[in-house]
Image (cartoon, rainbow, N blue to C red):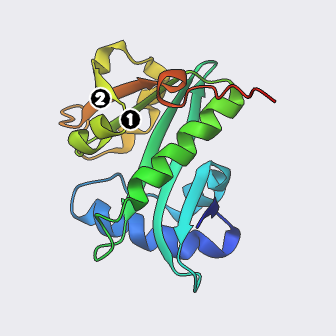
Amino acid sequence: MIRNARMGDVKEIHSLLNYYAGKGLLLSRSFSSLYDQLRDFKVFADESGELLGVCALHISWADLAEIRSLAVKEGVQGQKIGAKLVRSCLEEAKEFGISNVFTLTYQSDFFRKQGFTDADKRDLPHKIWSDCLNCSKFPDCDEEALQCKVFDVIPDTVSNV
């Protein structure tokens, strides 16, 4: 089940994201940043309420948002949890009227399967680099930039009713 993150999820989100940050796969997130940006996050929880995955849609500019902090617990990867979280974020972008979404990732093949295409980091607005300034890999980032046109990936459904 995908739902908006809640205050009670912050410790689990922090633990999951920082687990992958420790492996060099994500930026670490402080508790403070998670509380500040909690509205950006969606979680995938199982029937018992255990958090199995997390993803955020961060609005960057008038018509630009970022998919960030996508993480799925080891042991449940390969069950389309990440794909469902990304799709949920893209649907939310569409609801906001945002047509351009990008991501910076080491999992480029996964995002290509979700409808993203390669992008040049230099084409992204400087505003998005605010998080990058806090990264230990800055300015030699080896993440790949990908983007998608939301309305191409999440087409309008026309009803004949």
Q: Residue at x 33, y 36 (%)?
A: 104
Residue type at mark 2?
Ala
Residue linked to disc 2: 145
User: Residue shown at 30%/63% (left/top)?
Assistant: 20
Residue 112, which numbered label?
none
Q: From the viewer's perspective, is residue 38 above or below residue 138?
A: below
Q: Quadrant of residue 22?
A: bottom left
The residue most toward the right is: 161
Quarter of the figure that contains the C terminus: top right
Name the residue tied to disc 1: 103
- Would residue 59 be found to the left or right of residue 118 on screen? right
Indicate the position of residue 137 as horizontal and vertical percent values.
Answer: 22, 42
Q: Nearer the viewer, residue 130 or 148?
A: 148
Query: Which residue occupies the foreground of this view, 104 or 27?
Result: 104
- State the SS at label 1: strand
Question: Is 127 rendered above or below residue 80?
Answer: above
Q: Amino acid at mark 1?
A: Thr
Mark 2 surroundings within 10 Å by alpha-carbon count, few (fewer than 14), some (14 through 19), many (20 or more): many
